[in-house]
Image: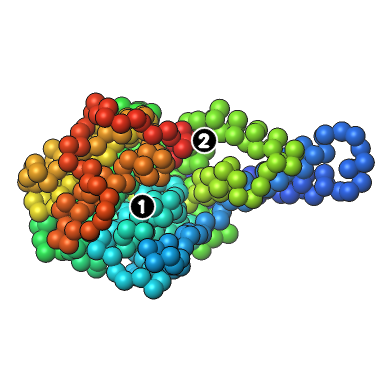
Amino acid sequence: MVYKGARGMLSYDAMETLRNTNEWMGASARAMASYPLFAMIPSPFFKVMSAWGRVTERSFARMVIKPDWEIPPIPSADGQDHLVYVEPVIRRPFGSLVHFRVARREPMARRVLLVAPMSGHYATLLRSTVTSLLPDCDVWVTDWHNARDIPVSEGKFDVEDYTRYLVDFMKHLGPDLHVVAVCQPAPLALVATAMLAEDEPAAQPRTLTLIGGPIDPDAAATEVTDFGNRMTMGELEHLFIQQVGFKYRGVGRMVYPGLAQLTSFIAMNAETHARAFRDKIVAEAKGEGSEGDKHNKFYDEYLAVMDMTAEFYLSTVERVFKKCEIAGNRFTVEGRAVDIGKIRDVAVMTVEGANDDISAPGQCVAALKLCSGVPEKKKAQHLEPGAGHYGIFAGKSWRINIRPLVLDFMDEHSQHPEQTSRPKRLRGMTGPGDTRRDPAEEDSKIAV
């Protein structure tokens, strides 16, 4: 164990050293190639070198910086712009419940808890989702913390702890709530709702919307599920689990490093990323780049990664993907079986993307079959044509097509329906094969 821990710490520090070295090389190239003297040389070499340095320095620096939420002001019907304040409501060692308070605005009828994924990126990955919901809803989000900054003395954090956090957050916000779980937490949000249904029925949310989540990973194979089935738990622990180095507060904690996760993300779409960075360097060299261009906005978020605790990563792979405990309704928390069939009073909706290569169609909609106690009139499903994983919660598909359906679903099953002039689109919503409207173009084909 001592040898393994020391080796893990050496590997972690080696990755950080490599990142730091590339950041330094980018900064050095930028500074050196920007000397005024080199402007007299009739060659594009120094402009390209400076551009490469700027892009490289920024990219590798972003990997250890938590992005800000930067939520823009929310316009209102009276013509005023209302500032948005990000306020932690509950602080826990491994995650906080954050409220987006809109200044000088009365509470909205729709109260939404966005359950953010803990899969290598910060909760700010849902920034555009939050921004799109704020004009019509009061919004809270689960803001998970970077494991490298959590002292070992705080103990472990696995899928059961994650589920208990969700239960506590839902209980705190009360029953008049709509829960929207995006991607990885969808199965655990389903389990947390089932726990409330059995223990405190009055604290259940009104609706539960599951977006692109692996409820039943075996329902449709993807590269992610194939990888999980191909590797043994021993191989995963040996190859990917490392120990936080001395640079961070969580020194000694066993983690699945964000840099390792980022490497796998990029490898899945290596050609797309290479082309994006090549085009960005050319644009910078021509003087056409800007601070707020699409490349910087996307990669400032995409490259900002966080470590997961080793126990959370390994228990997710083993229990959700390999043993399919949730898909088989066999999940337990502290040895106690959780029966998803106990959910009866919560309306459940699933959203999938037809081109989702992370959580393929069929994986998420499996939740509806598990919710055997929910009446059919309280169930809904939507398959978005032409949409990939990112698009169903943050791209054009979400903004134009999915968001209105989700809001209508909330209103349909709320005690206090929101009165809006927008025509409802929930009635007649269909699943696979819906061709009544043109597919929205994806904002990005990059997997997240």
User: Which residue carries the number 1 mark?
Assistant: 116
Question: Quarter of the image holding residue 45?
Answer: top right
Q: Earlier in the sequence, mark 1 or mark 2?
A: 1
Residue at the image position 58 percent from the left and 59 percent from the top: 247
Disc 2 secondary structure class:
helix
Disc 1 secondary structure class:
loop
Residue 52 placed where, x, y %? 72, 40
Q: Quadrant of the C terminus?
A: top left
Question: Quarter of the image holding residue 325?
Answer: top left
Question: Is residue 425 in view from this perspective?
Answer: yes
Residue at the image position 59 percent from the left and 34 percent from the top: 276
Residue at the image position 32 percent from the left and 40 percent from the top: 401
The answer to whether 348 is drawn above or below residue 369 in the figure is below
Image color mode: rainbow
Name the mark on residue 266.
Answer: 2
Name the mark on residue 242.
Answer: none
Question: Is residue 11 in view from this perspective?
Answer: no
The three-letter code of the residue at mark 1 reads Ala
The answer to whether 411 is drawn above or below residue 25 in the figure is below
Residue at the image position 34 percent from the left and 30 percent from the top: 438
Residue 433 placed where, x, y %? 24, 26
User: Could you say which is closer to the camera, residue 429 or residue 18?
Assistant: 429
Circle 1 residues within 10 Å: few <14, some 14–19, many ≥20: many
Residue 11 placed where, x, y %? 55, 45
User: Could you say which is closer to the camera, residue 191 or residue 138?
Assistant: 138
User: Going by the image, does 206 lie left or right of 43?
Assistant: left
The three-letter code of the residue at mark 2 reads Ile
